[in-house]
Amino acid sequence: MTLRPLPPLLQEKSQREINEDPDRIASDLSAIREWIEKQPHLKSVNPSDQWLLAFLRGNKFSLEKTKNKLDMYYTLRTVVPEIFRNRNPFDPTVQAILNMGIFLPLRVTKSEDSCRVCLQRFKDFDSSKYRFVDIVKVCFMIIEILILEDDNFIIAGEDLLMDGTGLDLTTLSQWTPALAKKCVTIFTKALPVRLKSSYLFNMSPGYETAYNLFKIFLSEKLKNRFHIYGNGFEALYDVMPRNLLPKEYGGEQGTVQELTDYWKKKVESYSEWYLREELACSDESLRPNNPHTSSSLFGVEGSFRKLLVD
């Protein structure tokens, strides 16, 4: 068992806030792995210890909650193929989305034990050529890298900055209730992530409508973590250290293009992992009792276009 050691302050936070006990990690990992091996519908699943540890941390070391999230994660890999299939980083569509720099985790944290700040931006998205679900796919590809590599992201959580510049009605019309519910389900019920705060700015009226649709599927606890600002980003300096941000946002940590290039290369370096992991998913024909399907898990259809024009 080879696990990445934590820096001292992050280790203290992990023990204080998410119940981590270094002496218990090996037995917890063993218990989760034994559980996976006993699940007839998860025969193709054999994750690394670091991956399993991220799920334990994301569920505050509750074995039952960890099992539930792992089961849901590998189930969604099967029933949501539009997001979890065909994730070759060198696919032309994936390359195009990566080149747009739509989801960019920032390189520096405020301190050794602080949250990871991630920037979501849509300025360069071309809705005439690509689909909103393509954005979602690439975002989750990057999040999976954070799960594997970024202990701050897993233990301290995520602060999300969402810049609505460039979101037009054509793009937002693709943000259907079905896609919104799938995104919320993946983020809240399948991944070991902790959203601490989300700051939305440069919001057009259409963006606000899309956000309101997204909120329908959020718990009250999560709704309270979303904060809406007006145009511009200067107000963010009251809640976000300015020096962490890219130069385009008044910060000191390089440019958006440099971040885009970094994450493009990082995703490309995981090409073999994405190919291998595509085979790790639930076989719903072998699930005890009732198999899961997209309709049984989500059950919402319909276009967002009508909501936009009403």
Image (cartoon, helix red, strand yellow):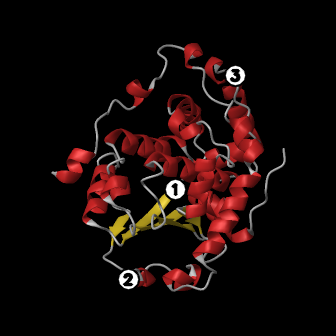
Identify which amino acid the numbered label 2 is placed on.
Answer: Ala
Using the image as rendered, state which of residue 16 and residue 56 is in the foreground. 56
For the residues labelled 3 and 1, the Cα–Cα distance comes to: 28 Å
Between discs 1 and 2, the one toward the N terminus:
1
| Image quadrant in which you'd find residue 230 | bottom left
Say whether residue 185 is left or right of residue 112.
Answer: left
Say whether residue 9 is left or right of residue 305.
Answer: right
Please give the name of the residue rendered at 57% of the width and 51% of the height, measured from the top-left corner. Answer: 138
Using the image as rendered, state which of residue 61 and residue 196 is in the foreground. 196
For the residues labelled 3 and 2, the Cα–Cα distance comes to: 50 Å
Identify which amino acid the numbered label 1 is placed on.
Answer: Arg
Between discs 3 and 1, the one toward the N terminus:
3
User: Residue at label 3?
Assistant: 43
Is residue 294 visible in the rendered image? The answer is: yes
Dot 2 crowding, Cα within 10 Å, few <14, some 14–19, many 20+: few
Q: Position of residue 144 (x, y in %)?
A: 63, 49
For the residues labelled 1 and 2, the Cα–Cα distance comes to: 24 Å
On screen, 165 above or below 126? Answer: below
Is residue 28 visible in the rendered image? The answer is: no
Say whether residue 226 is left or right of residue 253.
Answer: left
**Residue extending farthest front:** 128
Q: Position of residue 2 (x, y in %)?
A: 84, 48
User: Residue at label 2?
Assistant: 235
On screen, 5 above or below 270? Answer: below
Dot in front, 1 or 2 = 2
Between discs 3 and 2, the one toward the N terminus:
3
Please give the name of the residue rendered at 32% of the width and 42% of the height, measured from the top-left corner. Answer: 177
Please give the name of the residue rendered at 38% of the width and 32% of the height, measured from the top-left corner. Answer: 298
Give the structural element (helix, strand or loop) at label 3: loop
- Circle on res. 194: 1
Please give the name of the residue rendered at 55% of the width and 84% of the height, measured from the top-left corner. Answer: 251
